[in-house]
């Protein structure tokens, strides 16, 4: 077993039965493992609906640790048989080989393994003081990395199993997050560790997702499965929820343009939405291909809207003035699942999340040329990204429990 698997296994064992019980326990058969999985792993949600393209052995160790973080009792003596059964039954399949496009740009990557196994760091965030943050979605913590000292501190949150997801910093240095399974927006004061929570006013708004501040200091957020776009006044705590015109549009990633408009990619349909912050009017721009499913968004200085089409494997550009759309096939093809994206000085950087291994991709709009690199250790999976004040790129690699700083050419 690799050092990381050993660490995860030991940590998982520490939450379950004592050592004596482990030594005396009979060895599970594959049928025993299947029965345990059927009885336990399907209790919250159908397992078959969540495995996607499967996991490696190491990935299943991490997935089981995530379950333990949420209180699922997994006896340590069952761990090897469970991982063996799951790896055999739900192996990695259907993932394209990463296509590496050569080029002249050079990058350097530094990764930090976060302290809590199975925490599934979801979103990264680069703070103004140079620190890097991540949301430990399955460990109910926010984490702060000091790149200079390489030290990591995790801050526990108030509501249990709140599922911290999106991250953004306000002007005072507070860290705001979405409680994706807690139906809340949270604010952490890093100086004191104090957490303030703002509950959703509508019981249907159960899954706050991504958030962003506009120029006026108002906080905007998406509520994916409830089909809402939210606005929160940090001064009063007042929350208003808007409903996009299209049902089941699944508002997902968001960003603001130079005029303060809020743009949202709608992952359930082939469209991008714009919210006027003054009138609260929502306008939708339909993408040409009905199969398009935009998942994350970046806006360049010329107010061009860039999006990753997760379902079709494309990088797309929307001109909101004309409605014109242009698309480029991602280097690793239609099943590469482009996901987290940022723009740095007009150049687009994003990750292909279903390739083996995962990649980072650079696209220059001026030349319309790609360059790409594989992520050391495989990545798996970069769901969102951010940019540091000095123009470097931050990734959260959720299934390998890492945060990566990518130093870009300047």
Image (cartoon, grey):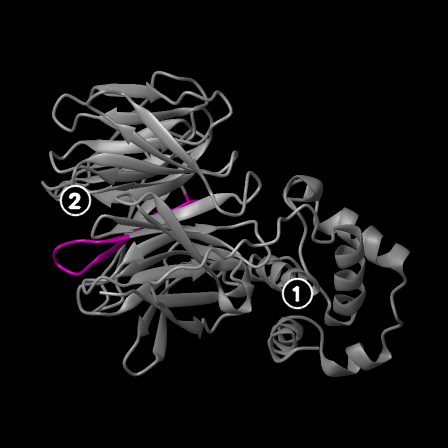
Q: Image point 14% across, 40% down: which residue?
A: 236
Residue 85 appears in the figure: yes
Q: Name the element at disc 2.
A: loop
User: Is residue 181 shown in magenta?
Assistant: yes
Count of marks, rendered view: 2
Q: Name the element at disc 1.
A: helix
| Residue closer to the observer: 157 or 304 | 304
Quadrant of the snapshot with the N terminus: bottom right
Residue 325 lies, in percent from the top left, at 33, 26
- Give the mark toward the camera: 2 or 1: 1
Q: Does 370 sit left or right of 70 as displayed?
A: left
Q: Image point 18% across, 62% down: which residue?
A: 389
| Of callouts 2 and 1, the N-terminal one | 1
User: Is residue 410 shown in magenta?
Assistant: no
Q: Mark 2 points at which residue?
A: 234
Quadrant of the snapshot with the C terminus: bottom left
Residue 61, disc: 1
Residue 301 lies, in percent from the top left, at 16, 42
């Amino acid at each position: 077993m690799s050092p990381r698997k050993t660490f995860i296994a030991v940590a998982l064992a520490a939450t379950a039965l004592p050592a004596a019980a482990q030594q005396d326990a009979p060895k599970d058969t594959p049928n025993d493992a299947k029965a345990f999985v059927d009885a336990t792993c399907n209790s919250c949600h159908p397992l078959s609906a969540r495995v996607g393209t499967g996991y490696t052995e190491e990935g299943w160790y991490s997935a089981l640790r995530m379950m333990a973080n949420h209180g699922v009792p997994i006896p340590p003596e069952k761990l090897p048989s469970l991982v063996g059964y799951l790896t055999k039954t739900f192996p990695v399949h259907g993932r394209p080989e990463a296509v590496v496009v050569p080029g002249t740009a050079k990058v350097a990557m530094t990764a930090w393994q976060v302290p809590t196994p199975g925490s599934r760091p979801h979103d990264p965030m680069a703070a103004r003081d140079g620190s890097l943050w991540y949301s430990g979605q399955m460990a109910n913590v926010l984490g702060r990395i000091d790149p200079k000292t390489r030290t990591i501190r995790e801050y526990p949150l108030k509501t249990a199993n709140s599922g911290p997801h999106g991250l953004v910093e306000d002007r005072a240095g507070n860290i705001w997050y979405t409680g994706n399974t807690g139906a809340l927006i949270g604010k952490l004061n890093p100086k004191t560790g104090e957490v303030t929570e703002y509950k959703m006013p509508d019981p249907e708004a159960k899954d706050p997702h991504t958030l962003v501040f506009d120029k006026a200091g108002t906080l905007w957020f998406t509520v994916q499965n409830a089909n809402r776009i939210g606005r929160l006044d940090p001064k009063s705590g007042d929350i208003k929820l808007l409903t996009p015109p299209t049902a089941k549009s699944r508002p997902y990633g968001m960003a603001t343009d130079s005029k303060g408009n809020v743009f949202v990619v709608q992952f359930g349909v082939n469209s991008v939405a714009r919210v006027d912050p003054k009138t609260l009017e929502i306008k939708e721009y339909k993408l040409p291909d009905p199969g398009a499913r935009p998942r994350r968004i970046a806006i360049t200085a010329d107010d061009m809207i860039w999006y990753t089409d997760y379902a079709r494997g494309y990088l797309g550009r929307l001109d909101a003035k004309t409605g014109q759309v242009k698309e480029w096939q991602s280097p690793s093809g239609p099943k590469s699942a482009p996901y987290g994206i940022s723009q740095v000085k007009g150049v687009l950087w994003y990750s292909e999340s279903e390739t083996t291994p995962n990649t980072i991709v650079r696209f220059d709009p001026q030349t319309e040329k790609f360059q790409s690199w594989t992520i050391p250790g495989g990545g798996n999976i970069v769901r969102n990204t951010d940019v540091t004040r000095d123009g470097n790129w931050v990734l959260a690699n959720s299934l390998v429990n890492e945060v990566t700083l990518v130093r870009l050419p300047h």
